Image (cartoon, rainbow, N blue to C red):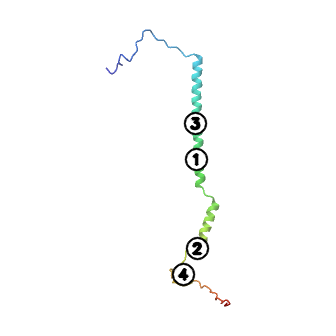
Amino acid sequence: MASEPPKAMVPSVQAPQHFVPPTGREMRTQAVHRLQVGLLGLCAMLLLVGLANIVMDRARLVEERDPVEEIIAAQQEEAKKPATDPLADIGVVPAADPSATPEPVEIEPIEPGPVE
């Protein structure tokens, strides 16, 4: 039946078996082993939390932007002029924006050089 193990797997017991209590040395060894495992677990958790803290600090530093950089970026955007058509600027072709008028450009006369 399923509730009884097969007879070949159970060794035959010829004499009564008695429980032998562990000696003081064995108990001390078990206590030291448990203490070592516990301390190792605590150290592992401490290192894991420290590593997570370092990762979070680095992520926070990357997300923060320096206010000076924001001011410089805003000034650079203001300094940029919109792209214009150079031919419309000198008056060769009409301007794409009808309200914009080209600024007059002064042309210096070319002086002829000495003829050799």
Tell me the amino acid under the disc marked 1: Val
Depicted 60 relative to depicted 37: above or below: below
Residue drawn at (56%, 81%) of the image: 89
Mark 3 — residue?
A: 44
**First in sequence: mark 4 or mark 3?**
3
> Quarter-wise, where is residue 48 in the image?
top right
Residue drawn at (57%, 16%) of the image: 23
Tell me the amino acid under the disc marked 3: Ala
Residue 62 x, y percent position in the rendering? 59, 54
**First in sequence: mark 1 or mark 3?**
3
In which quadrant is the C terminus drawn?
bottom right
Q: Secondary structure at mark 1?
A: helix
Mark 1 — residue?
A: 55
Residue drawn at (58%, 34%) of the image: 42
Residue 107 x, y percent position in the rendering? 62, 86
**First in sequence: mark 4 or mark 2?**
2
Q: CA distance from mark 4 to mark 3?
A: 71 Å
Q: Secondary structure at mark 3?
A: helix
Mark 4 — residue?
A: 87
Q: Secondary structure at mark 4?
A: helix
Residue 104 x, y percent position in the rendering? 59, 85
Depicted 111 relative to depicted 30: above or below: below
Q: CA distance from mark 1 to mark 3?
A: 17 Å
Q: CA distance from mark 2 to mark 1?
A: 41 Å
Q: CA distance from mark 2 to mark 3?
A: 58 Å
> Quarter-wise, where is residue 45 in the image?
top right
